[in-house]
Image (cartoon, rainbow, N blue to C red):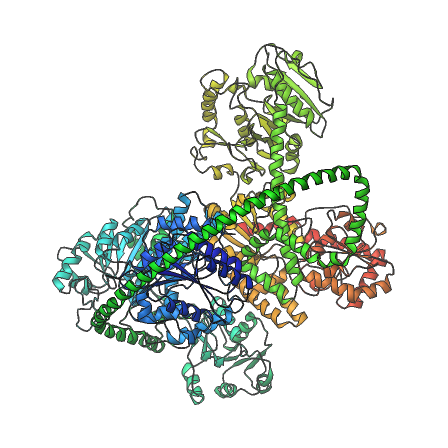
């Protein structure tokens, strides 16, 4: 039994007073249970740190050791471990914080097993022990969070441990027994720090010790405080040493990370926190909960594509086939793949890998397929695997082979309880020798019987269960039939398709193929040939210098003298030299010419010179397109398309036979994909096969070109670090280690006994010393208390004296205050004078940085959150790198400043929205305040008209006080158009006209008898004079603008028949946002009781019906329909029926959220459905159902998927993701996006827009909502990831703009939105713009950045379903680079038609463009410095105006009397209508330029560079003037500025260009094709 030693907590200190204080205060406040705290000051360069440590030592709170000079971390901790002989050691960094029983948890883990060397706790920043995000630095709010987390871990993972490959040194419990056996840290190798704990742990591991995670302990770790300046150098050195000493260490850690066995422990902690009411976002700075879920619960080796395919399979209603086979490939795999292609259903293929490993192949009906590899298939894991498979709707099992499977496979198949087929590919049912030979393949799994008779008995249950045992030959049928008499075996040859191919034309390329010699050209042409000329085969006699996946046959390297034989052996039809750089000679060309074969080559260098006289040569430009190269090769080989001849095709007949027995219809599939994925994660990774040495596998694969073997080699090498140059012999190392283990037990027993004796003696000495220390400490404490008591007494006297002085000072201040009040004017004047002096003083200017710092500190919290957000996003690194390479440091700081300000603006906007909502409630309460009984109603004046546009009809029956409140609200917030108010009195006991006699401007109508709500409303409507009719309940109070928004809906949207309002409850919550009618005729008030600010309820949309409390309709339409149908008299369902009749007429029923009206329910008819008028709600509901049941048949059952039902009149659901909130008043990209959203909405889609930064802008959001577009923002969205996960299954299309946004969400979108079409909106091709900028500047860093961008954009284009570009140039460019991609052009879209003043009414030159766009900065600088001098010479006194948002100081500094710099202008229309010439002096860029479109739209002639009008269908001199050089550019400006005839021609041409190519009508066909 191990002896527990006393514990010393060692805290080495070097830098960071704040961190050191937090650490030591937390340690001293925690449960130390007698443990000593030893602080070692390693000659800290910070005096305050040293002073603090001394103070703790002086108070005997810690033991202090001070190094006279800096020794470095390793030597310092060694010194502590030597000083504390006989003690277990906890090495605790000085930038940590602990809480509660942390130390006892560590100590308990350390003694939970016999040979534990080290123990590490969980932490926010501890690499493999990090929480909540694995292997990340999770920033923690420091205050009480540490104790909360310690408590959560202590409960969730009580006494739980898990083996680690190594400890993590921030907090490391080391058992003294191990320390004595292994030795101290290696000072010589690791110097000042980093890596020493890994080396120690690996030495301990080699000696048989364990390293554990203490799962019930959490310690906060800030990180990089002491060595933050030297970390890179120190860690680099440590890595080199570790790699040299322990070659397998990094691959072992990589394997541990890939498996992530800590995941369940982290998950339990998260759930414990949730159970106690704590959300992770409240504990960890900058991490929203959905982001944590992404990393915490989805960390898996399963790829996003595999997750998506699995998700589709789980959600499918169709049963799937399960094929069970081995992993050998060959004929069995060929047959399996043939069946996968034949059957018209989903297929799951399980391949046994041996040792419990499984390869799961998912092959969906639509063609998608993915592979997942897992382990753990054995008797113990069988129930879990069975549970996973039962979540899939398996309709039939087809067994092809049992090799690689344990015998528990039989229980799996029987446990699935579905029909079974067995195909006999050999004699595996008969014998473990599958070919019935001693030397053939044999079953190697020990769980199977070895004897043939026992083997057959074990398999008999499967044979009996099988509906079909299929034998492809009569011989195998007979042999298996003998072994299993009575079993019906069907003779059925395998299905196959065999054809004799037509002639193949072989083109060879010679030598080592580099990019300079045309590697990329060969790849492109090979891929193109596979599509357009499939009988052309390209062979490389040689090898490529980069791996390639193009369809090229590669023969490999060769000796020079072998080339003639290889050429003769290959028998090519032509030879190709696609060099991209001039060659000086080319020996391979000599061999090619000697062959007498046709040669196709680049017209460069020696190739062009030497082939000039060769009769069969065809020379092309080196940069020819792939299609041009292919045509030349086809001519060279005399290509003709010849079809193949079919020899045999039994597939259709086999398919018909195979699918005759139906698949079993199993229970509804599970849709909880995440749960299934997590279950798969619980299985261990499949083990590699030790019988196949990697070296022999590699040689076998190279020599045989066996693809399966080569894949296995690749899999085994995946754990090697990318920097590895050698592979160590692990098998020999393990064998030696096992041999050493045989001798270790005896030695350990002897050493253990010796050690126990030494420990006993040391323990006795330690106890004696400990008692003396405690006695001395107690005596010193008593003396200290005496001293403090004496000091306290003295302090009380001193405080009394100070109090007397303070009172005297207060009296003096009161006197001075009186004097101050009397002379305030004089003092204020003097103070103003002094302020002026200070502001001009030297000290004021010197202290300016401190005042700036103060402002920065106040904003630091926002800044920290913004920096943290960007640190987690790859897109931010990309944009940062782009700005850094341009040297735009000011832009970086400006961008951060804008984001900080933006966060504050966002918060202010949300606060303002909340305040407005509260103000509405207060206004409602003011209107709803009842007039005391027996008091007359106060006067109300309604300014109505005898010729109204709108008639407001209010049906009433009694409740005149309520009607008065309604009228007061109308008087306060009347329509802007002329209106009238009609009160329809349904024979109230007291006449409404008499009671409301003090109300002016109202017309009353009163019938002779009570007609009920329906008849009374119709009577009032018959008196209406207005074009529009608003039916308004008397128990309503209207808000500002409600009538205007109701009426505007008719003009803003097409085919509108009926408009309803947003109804609010008295507390401001939502009462109704349009209604939903279910299949049974019952209704829902959509959104009832929820927040009125929720974006789901704040966009215009079609609804089943809108409440009759507020309805707007054309008066003639209401009359034509006969008003409310009296079939529903006296009341209820009349409004719903009206809505359905409106739709039957071909018109729309629209909900208008901007028309807000408070509705006091139940005032007229009460709420009891069993009595009074309210009782008709039930009976009329039945009438309504009978009338409309044929329409209702397409509706869902009650409460089923209300989100979808609320948008039932949409074609589908579209999500649009942009980088930030659009700003149509600031940039053309936003105008394009706004019109794209409009078109999608006009096409009938439910469109949801979300900005990646979740930005909220009230004006833009209101504009989009009014168009019928849902906008998610701030907390209502949470994050784009949360939106995707929540909406994904219902989405039909996802538009993602800009490559740096799309790259973040594409994989998740594929996984969670299986039926959605993914559309990548490039906005412009960023890589084209960057390439041009790099070419213009000559900057190699920018060139490299452009290459990275190009790779990313092209990868996205390949992975998305459709790509949108803005010009024909970009589409053609992509057709050449990515010919397989589907690309559509959706260019700039302009729908606004402004006034266009003529030539004489205009003056000046105008540039408009946003300055977040680097090409615009360059353009204005070039114009100001190079072009302006010529303009001033040609047009003296003419002013150029520069307008644009986010303008940097470098542009502002260009201002002079001829160059007006305005920056952002709120209303730019006067400038556009007043300018005579617009300029677009861009020297680089990509896409279509909005500034040019905008100028054309306003009729301003544009002078531009060719780059600025690229892809815009312009003609120089007809609709634009184009110039490149500064002087020519200025001359073009002057020419059109001074020539009215030319001006008018260019102006009219620009308008025609815009209408032809950049209008909604021009864009709509491409959008329709995209969505089709």
> Could you say where residue 1138 lies in the image, as x and y percent from the top left?
55, 26
Please provide percent x and percent y for residue 375: 30, 60
Q: Residue furthest right?
A: 1436
Count of marks placed on residues: 0
In the rendered image, is residue 339 in sight? Answer: no
In terms of depth relative to the viewer, which is nearer, 1524 or 172?
Answer: 172
- Front residue of 978/768: it is 768
Q: Residue at x 60, y 80 (%)?
A: 603
Q: Quadrant of the N terminus?
A: bottom left
Is residue 190 placed above or below 883 in the rendered structure?
below
- Check the image and name the residue furthest to the bottom: 561
Task: Tell me where residue 525 appears, x and y as whole percent.
Answer: 51, 71
Q: Relative to residue 842, is residue 580 drawn left or right?
A: left
On screen, residue 67 above or below 1094: below
* Direction from residue 45 to residue 213 in the image, left or right: left
**Front one among 1312 and 693:** 693
Q: Give the side of residue 43 with respect to residue 467, left or right.
A: right
Q: Please state the horizontal and vertical placement of residue 680, each as a whole percent of the image.
A: 34, 55
Quadrant of res 1407 = bottom right
Residue 879 visible in image: yes
């Amino acid at each position: 039994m191990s002896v527990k030693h006393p514990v010393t907590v060692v805290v080495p200190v070097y830098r960071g007073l704040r961190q050191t204080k937090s650490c030591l205060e937390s340690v001293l406040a925690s449960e130390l249970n007698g443990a000593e705290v030893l602080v070692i000051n390693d000659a800290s360069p910070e005096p305050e740190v040293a002073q603090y440590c001394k103070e703790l030592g002086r108070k005997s709170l810690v033991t202090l050791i001070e190094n006279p000079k800096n020794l470095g971390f390793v030597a310092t901790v060694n010194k502590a471990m030597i000083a504390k002989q006989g003690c277990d050691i906890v090495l605790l960094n000085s930038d940590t914080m602990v809480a509660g029983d942390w130390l006892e948890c560590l100590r308990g883990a350390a003694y939970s097993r016999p040979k534990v060397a080290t123990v590490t706790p969980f932490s926010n920043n501890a690499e493999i022990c990090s929480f909540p995000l694995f292997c990340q630095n999770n920033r923690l709010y420091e205050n009480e969070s540490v104790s909360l987390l310690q408590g959560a871990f202590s409960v969730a993972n009580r006494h739980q441990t898990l083996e680690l490959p190594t400890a993590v040194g921030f907090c490391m419990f080391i058992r003294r027994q191990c320390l004595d056996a292994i030795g101290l840290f290696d000072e010589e190798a690791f110097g000042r720090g980093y890596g020493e704990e890994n080396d120690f742990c690996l030495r301990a591991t080699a000696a048989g010790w364990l390293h554990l995670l203490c799962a019930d302990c959490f310690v906060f770790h800030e990180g990089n405080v002491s060595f933050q300046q030297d970390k890179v150098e120190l860690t680099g050195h440590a890595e080199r040493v570790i790699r040299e000493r322990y070659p397998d260490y990094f691959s072992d850690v990589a394997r541990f990370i890939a498996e992530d066995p800590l995941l369940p422990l982290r998950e339990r902690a998260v759930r414990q926190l949730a159970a106690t009411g704590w959300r992770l976002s409240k504990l960890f700075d900058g991490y929203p909960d959905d982001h944590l879920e992404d990393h915490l619960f989805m960390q898996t080796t399963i790829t996003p594509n595999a997750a998506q395919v699995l998700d589709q399979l789980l959600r499918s209603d169709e049963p799937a086939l399960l094929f069970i086979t081995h992993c050998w490939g060959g004929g069995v795999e060929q047959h399996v793949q043939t069946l996968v292609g034949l059957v018209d259903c989903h297929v799951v293929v399980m391949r046994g890998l041996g040792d419990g490993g499984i390869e799961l192949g998912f092959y969906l009906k639509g063609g998608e397929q993915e592979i997942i590899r897992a382990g753990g298939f054995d008797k113990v894991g069988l129930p879990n695997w069975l549970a996973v498979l039962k979540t899939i709707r398996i309709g039939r099992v087809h067994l092809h082979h049992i090799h690689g499977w344990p015998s528990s496979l039989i229980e799996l198949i029987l446990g699935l309880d579905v029909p079974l087929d067995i195909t006999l590919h050999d004699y595996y049912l008969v014998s473990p020798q599958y070919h019935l030979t001693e030397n053939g393949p044999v079953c190697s799994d020990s769980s199977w019987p070895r004897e043939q008779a026992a083997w057959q008995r074990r398999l008999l249950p499967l044979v009996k269960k099988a509906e079909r045992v299929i034998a492809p030959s009569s011989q195998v049928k007979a042999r298996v039939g003998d072994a299993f008499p009575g079993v019906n075996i069907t003779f059925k040859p395998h299905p196959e398709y065999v054809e004799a191919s037509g002639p193949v034309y072989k083109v060879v390329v010679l030598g080592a193929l580099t990019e300079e010699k045309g590697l990329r050209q060969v790849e492109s042409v090979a891929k193109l040939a596979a599509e357009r000329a499939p009988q052309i085969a390209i062979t490389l006699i040689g090898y490529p210098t980069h791996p390639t996946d193009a369809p090229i046959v590669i023969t490999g390297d060769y000796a020079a003298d072998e080339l003639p034989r290889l050429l003769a052996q290959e028998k090519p039809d032509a030879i190709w030299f696609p060099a991209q750089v001039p060659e000086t000679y080319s020996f391979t060309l000599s061999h090619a010419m000697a062959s007498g074969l046709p040669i196709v080559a680049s017209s460069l260098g020696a190739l062009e010179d030497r082939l000039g006289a060769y009769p069969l040569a065809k020379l092309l430009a080196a940069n020819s397109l792939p299609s041009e190269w292919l045509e030349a090769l086809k001519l060279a080989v005399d290509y003709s398309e010849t079809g193949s001849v079919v020899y045999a095709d039994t597939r259709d007949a086999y398919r018909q036979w195979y699918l005759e027995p139906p698949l079993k219809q199993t229970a509804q599939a599970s849709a909880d994909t995440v749960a299934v994925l997590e279950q798969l994660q619980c299985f261990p990774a499949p083990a590699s096969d030790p019988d196949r040495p990697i070296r022999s596998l590699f040689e076998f694969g190279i020599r045989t070109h066996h693809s399966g073997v080569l894949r296995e080699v690749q899999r085994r090498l995946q754990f090697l670090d990318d920097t590895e140059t050698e592979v160590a012999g692990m098998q020999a190392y393990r064998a030696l280690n096992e041999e050493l283990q045989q001798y270790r037990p005896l030695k350990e027993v002897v050493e253990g006994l010796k050690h126990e004796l030494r420990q006993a003696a040391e323990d006795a000495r330690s106890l004696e010393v400990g008692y003396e220390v405690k006695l001395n400490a107690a005596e010193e404490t008593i003396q200290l208390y005496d001293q403090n008591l004496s000091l306290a007494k003295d302090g009380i006297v001193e405080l009394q004296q100070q109090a007397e002085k303070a009172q005297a000072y207060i009296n003096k201040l009161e006197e001075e205050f009186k004097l101050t009040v009397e002379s305030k004017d004089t003092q204020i004047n003097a103070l103003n004078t002094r302020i002026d002096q200070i502001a001009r003083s030297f000290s004021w200017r010197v202290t300016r940085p401190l005042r700036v710092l103060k402002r920065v500190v106040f904003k630091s919290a926002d800044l920290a959150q913004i920096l943290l957000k960007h640190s987690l996003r790859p897109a931010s690194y990309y944009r940062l790198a782009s700005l850094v390479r341009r040297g735009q440091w000011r832009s970086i700081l400006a961008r951060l400043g804008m984001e900080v300000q933006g966060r504050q603006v966002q918060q202010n906007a949300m606060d303002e929205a909340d305040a407005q909502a509260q103000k509405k409630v207060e206004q409602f309460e003011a209107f709803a305040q009842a007039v005391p009984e027996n008091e007359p109603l106060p006067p109300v004046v309604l300014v109505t008209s005898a010729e109204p546009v709108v008639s407001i009809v209010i049906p009433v029956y009694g409740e005149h006080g309520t009607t008065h409140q309604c009228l007061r609200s109308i008087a306060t917030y009347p329509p802007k158009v002329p209106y009238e108010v009609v009160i329809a009195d349904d024979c109230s006991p007291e006449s409404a006209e008499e009671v409301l006699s003090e109300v002016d401007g109202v017309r009353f109508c009163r019938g002779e008898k009570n007609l009920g709500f329906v008849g009374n409303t119709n009577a009032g409507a018959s008196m209406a004079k207005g074009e529009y009719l608003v039916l308004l309940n008397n128990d309503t109070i209207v808000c500002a603008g409600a009538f205007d928004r109701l009426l505007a809906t008719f003009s803003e949207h097409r085919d509108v028949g009926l408009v309803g309002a947003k109804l609010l409850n008295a507390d401001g919550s939502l009462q109704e946002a349009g209604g939903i009618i279910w299949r049974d005729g019952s209704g829902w008030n959509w959104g009832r009781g929820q927040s009125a600010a929720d974006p789901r309820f704040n966009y215009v949309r079609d609804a089943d019906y809108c409440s009759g409390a507020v309805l707007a309709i054309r008066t003639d339409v209401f009359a034509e329909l006969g008003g409310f149908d009296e079939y529903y008299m006296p009341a209820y369902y009349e409004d719903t029926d009206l809505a359905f009749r409106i739709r039957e007429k071909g018109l729309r029923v629209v909900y208008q959220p901007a028309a807000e009206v408070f509705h006091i329910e139940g005032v007229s008819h009460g709420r009891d459905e069993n009595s009074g008028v309210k009782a008709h709600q039930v009976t009329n509901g039945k009438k309504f159902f009978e009338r409309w049941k044929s329409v209702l048949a397409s509706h869902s059952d009650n409460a089923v998927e209300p989100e979808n039902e609320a948008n039932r009149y949409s074609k589908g659901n579209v999500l649009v993701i942009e980088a930030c909130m659009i700003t149509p008043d600031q940039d053309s990209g936003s105008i394009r996006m706004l019109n794209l959203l409009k078109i999608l909405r006009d096409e009938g889609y439910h469109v949801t827009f979300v900005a990646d930064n979740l930005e909220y802008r009230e004006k833009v959001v209101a504009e989009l909502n009014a168009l019928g577009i849902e906008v998610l923002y701030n907390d209502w969205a949470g994050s784009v990831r949360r939106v995707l996960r929540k909406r994904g299954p219902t989405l039909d299309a996802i538009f993602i703009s800009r490559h740096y946004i799309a790259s973040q969400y594409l994989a998740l979108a594929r996984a969670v939105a299986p039926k959605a079409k993914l559309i990548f909106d490039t906005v412009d091709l960023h890589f084209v713009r960057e390439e041009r900028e790099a070419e213009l500047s000559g900057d190699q860093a920018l060139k490299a950045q452009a290459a990275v961008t190009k790779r990313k954009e092209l990868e996205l284009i390949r992975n998305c379903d459709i790509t949108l570009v803005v010009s024909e140039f970009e589409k053609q460019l992509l057709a050449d680079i990515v010919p397989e991609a589907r690309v559509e052009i959706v260019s700039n879209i302009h729908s606004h038609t402004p006034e266009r003043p003529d030539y004489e009414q205009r003056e000046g030159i105008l540039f408009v463009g946003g300055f977040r766009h680097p090409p615009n900065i360059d353009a204005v600088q070039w114009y100001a410095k190079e072009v302006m001098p010529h303009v001033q010479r040609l047009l003296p006194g003419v002013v150029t105006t520069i307008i644009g948002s986010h303008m940097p100081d470098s542009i502002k500094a260009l201002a002079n009397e001829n160059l007006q710099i305005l920056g952002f202008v709120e209303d730019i229309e006067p400038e556009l209508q007043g300018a005579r010439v617009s300029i677009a002096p861009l020297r680089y860029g990509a896409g279509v330029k909005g500034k040019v479109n905008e100028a054309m739209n306003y009729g301003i002639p544009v002078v531009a560079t060719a780059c600025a009008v690229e892809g815009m269908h312009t003609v120089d001199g007809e609709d634009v003037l184009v110039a490149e050089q500064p002087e020519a550019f200025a001359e073009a400006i002057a020419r059109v500025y001074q020539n009215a005839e030319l001006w008018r021609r260019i102006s009219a041409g620009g308008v025609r260009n815009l209408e032809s190519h950049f209008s909604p009508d021009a864009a709509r066909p491409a959008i329709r094709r995209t969505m089709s």
